[in-house]
Image (cartoon, rainbow, N blue to C red):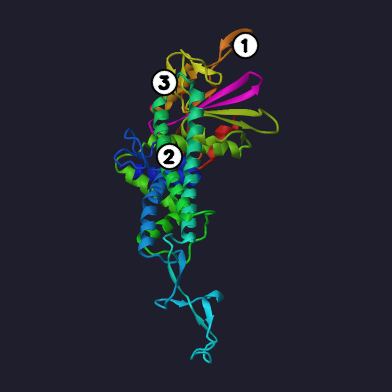
């Protein structure tokens, strides 16, 4: 149990540091009340996606209350001047036309002119313009944050569908779940859009969003809450801490550690390839988040082009995925690296993470050597043969800095790369990638 907690904490910590969005897919709370129009078929997410949704919901909830607080305590509110014929709760006017000559009156010596009108100030019925401009900036900032998540989700869904095939049922449950999150984001944005229109109407002609805090800052609990939300937008450390607390709460029910470990290994793969001189052509995040392909290129000697396939769904009855398919049945290796040697010629290397430390389970990854086949025939000794991956290795949270070769496989086509999030040493993965 202690080892599980340490592993879980290390995974969350690393993923928060390098790419917190990788926590979004399975980090959701099915028992949590859904806000801002979320579908009842999926709980509210707890990762960065959930943080953005909850922040937007809080803005939508507190802003009307904040406007009511301004009416009760109109500090700095817009005021109108009233002109009164009597000095009741009023001051002398500043307009020259409101004065009459005092000549011929008993007050002629003391005052050459007497006020005929007096000025009094009354509320214009509108809140302070600076306060409305700041609220407008807060709403627009949260709409921009939601838009970033919508773009990321759309990219992930598009990549997954294109990668798996439009007619494939593989993984469509995950696509549907991410689609539900997309609906929550769009519902949240619609709520904020309506709130923005209300603020623009309230602020009057020419109102422009302002990031400057109104001074004096209005009093009230809702205004304090909105100010905290404003500062939370730019405080990445506080955001990471809140995400960690959410995931810790979710851990009481159970976290899909296998998923987190798989994505952690994927990010380490991207990191290792980059360190080895491979530059990603495309954003790795959409492929790592759901599934897809990440393209890499490099200069210098040797191969120039490499593809990292994330969770390719291989089936003997469907078309090959990037040139590989299953000989029989269906296969789902976690990561396949395709090293393109020349036009139409490439090598395949499988890395399949597992949390199991059992030797037999890690050895079971050898199945990919037999059941994955490369598209097209290869010529060996003048004879056409069907080629498969050169290597099919496991990645497991083992201690150590050296790769472990399967003693039954002296050729090195199978083994285990030690990748422990609790105490990670990149040297073993670097050695494995060096052979590419």
| Outermost top residue | 383
Left-right relation of 69 to 105: left
- The answer to whether mark 1 and mark 2 are in CB contact below 8 A is no
Above or below — where is 207 with respect to 271? below
Q: Residues within 10 Å of mark 1 (few under 14, many from 20)?
A: few
Nearer to us: label 1 or label 2: 2
Front one among 134 and 227: 134
How many numbered discs, if any? Answer: 3
- Residue 307 is left or right of residue 51, and the answer is right
Q: Quadrant of the C terminus?
A: top right
Q: Which mark is residue 379?
A: 1
Secondary structure under badge 2?
helix
Q: Is residue 195 above or below residue 40?
A: below
Provide the secondary structure element on which disc 1 rests. Answer: strand
- In terms of depth relative to the viewer, which is nearer, 109 or 433? 109
Residue 66, position as x, y percentages in the image: 38, 57
Residue under label 2, please give it.
185
Q: Secondary structure at mark 3?
A: loop
């Amino acid at each position: 149990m202690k080892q599980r907690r340490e592993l879980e904490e290390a995974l969350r910590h690393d993923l928060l540091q390098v790419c917190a969005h990788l926590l979004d897919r399975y980090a959701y709370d099915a028992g949590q009340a859904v806000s801002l129009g979320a579908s009842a078929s999926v709980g509210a997410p707890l990762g960065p996606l959930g943080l953005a949704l909850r922040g937007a919901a809080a803005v939508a909830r507190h802003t009307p209350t904040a406007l009511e607080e301004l009416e009760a305590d109109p500090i700095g509110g817009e005021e109108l001047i009233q002109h009164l014929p009597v000095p009741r709760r009023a001051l002398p006017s500043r307009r020259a036309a409101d004065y009459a000559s005092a000549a011929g009156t008993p007050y002629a010596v003391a005052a050459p002119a007497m006020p005929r009108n007096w000025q009094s100030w009354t509320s214009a019925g509108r809140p302070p313009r600076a306060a409305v401009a700041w609220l407008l900036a807060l709403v627009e900032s949260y709409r921009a944050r939601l838009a970033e998540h919508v773009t990321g989700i759309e990219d992930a869904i598009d990549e997954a569908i294109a990668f798996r095939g439009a007619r494939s049922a593989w993984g469509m449950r995950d696509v549907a779940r991410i689609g539900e999150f997309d609906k929550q984001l769009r519902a949240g944005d619609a709520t904020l859009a309506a709130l923005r229109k209300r603020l623009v109407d309230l602020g009057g002609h020419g109102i422009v969003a302002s990031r400057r805090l109104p001074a004096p800052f209005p009093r009230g609990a809702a205004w304090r809450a909105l100010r905290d939300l404003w500062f939370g937008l730019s405080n990445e450390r506080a955001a990471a801490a809140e995400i960690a607390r959410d995931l810790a709460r979710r851990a009481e029910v159970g976290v899909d550690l296998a998923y987190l470990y798989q994505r952690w290994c994927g990010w380490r793969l991207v990191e290792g390839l980059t360190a080895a001189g491979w530059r990603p052509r495309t954003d790795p995040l959409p492929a790592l988040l759901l599934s897809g392909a990440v393209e890499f290129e490099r200069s210098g000697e040797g191969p120039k082009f490499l593809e990292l396939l994330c969770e390719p769904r291989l089936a003997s009855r469907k078309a090959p995925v990037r040139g590989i398919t299953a000989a029989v049945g269906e296969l789902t290796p976690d990561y396949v690296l395709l090293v393109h040697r020349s036009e139409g010629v490439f090598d395949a290397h499988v890395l399949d993470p597992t949390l199991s430390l059992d030797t037999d389970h890690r050895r079971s990854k050898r199945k990919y050597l037999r059941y994955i086949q490369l598209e097209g025939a290869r010529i060996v000794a003048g004879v056409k043969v069907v080629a498969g991956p050169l290597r099919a290795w496991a990645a497991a949270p083992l201690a150590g800095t050296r790769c472990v070769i399967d003693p039954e496989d002296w050729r090195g086509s199978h083994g285990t790369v030690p990748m422990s999030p609790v105490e990670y040493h990149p040297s073993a993965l670097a050695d494995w990638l060096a052979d590419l």
